[in-house]
Amino acid sequence: PAVEFGLEAPFSVDYHETIGSTNNRARELAANGAADVAVLADEQTGSRGRLDREWSSPSGGVWVSIVSRPTITPAQAPLYTLAAAVAIARAAREAGVDARIKWPNDVVVPVGDDGDYRKLAGILTEMEGETDRVDWIIPGIGVNANIDVDALPEGATSIRDEAGDVDRRLFVQRLLEEFDDYRNDLETVIPAWRDLALTLGQRVRVDRPAGEVVGEAVDITDSGALVIETDDGQETVSAGDCEHLRPV
Ligand code: BTN
């Protein structure tokens, strides 16, 4: 069902009260040629997280998957996900939450000054295409909005807990408008990401298939890779699971 959203950004909205996973629905639409559709649900029963993790999606959250057909190469795809993270963080900050980004694309709220945080939102991006061009890309966005923290996993927070409930329609509208601006101007993504980063300056451990890297996160590259100062020099890590460590 299509819903009118009063959006400035060029997305149509496909809204569901309850659905298995908005990413699954978005994949079906993409396979049928859709573009610029935001699949939105109040509640998901089979939501998927990164690295085959589960993602809890009770009623009250913002669960949205965006079908996009940009003219980008697969190498530029990470920028798309970072653009979504920047958009979420900016929309959450407008709602009064001290939202920051943990590399690569978790939106978190800092706890204390040592790099500790609670997770507010996550992104699962899926895509299909050839080696030189993306056919479709779907950033699947989960924001813990109007949800009690008791209903969320350990280590999570919500907009309700941080700043009080938001008007979810307005929040989604701001999120999609911000995302549209950044995806249309990919060069602005990394500078905006840097401004919101919680990870830069932290001691981190990044787990990746080629082994783990421990050191201080010092920068992010133009393509979104994390630059880590280790005991043996600099390493650039393009993907992996990042944990903030206590300062030594
Ligand atoms: C993560 O593990 O941090 C990413 C979580 C992504 C969850 C969102 S909720 C909307 C969309 N539909 C899904 O099944 N997953 C994503």
Image: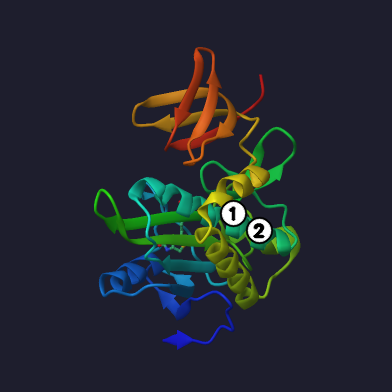
196 lies left or right of 189: right
Where is 246 relative to 125, above or below?
above
Q: Position of residue 8 (x, y in %)?
A: 58, 77
Q: Position of residue 85 (x, y in %)?
A: 55, 54
Label for residue 162? none
Q: Quadrant of the N terminus?
A: bottom left
Where is 199 relative to 247, above or below?
below
The amino acid at mark 2 is: Arg
Q: How crowded is mark 2: few (under 14 residues within 10 Å), some or many (20 or more)?
A: many
Q: Where is residue 178 in the image (x, y as percent from the top left)?
A: 60, 64
Whether pointer 2 and pointer 1 mark residues with C-beta atoms closer than 8 Å, the reply is yes
| Ligand 1 image position (quadrant) | bottom left
Label for residue 90? 2
Q: Choose between 238 and 122: the one closer to the eye.
A: 238
Element at badge 2? helix
Q: Quadrant of residue 65?
A: bottom left
Q: Residue shown at 46%/54% (left/top)?
A: 80
For label 1, the residue is: 86
Q: Residue shown at 35%/51% (left/top)?
A: 73
Where is 198 relative to 148, above or below?
above
Where is 103 relative to 31, above or below?
above
Q: Position of residue 52 (x, y in %)?
A: 36, 49
Decide if residue 121 is in sight here: no
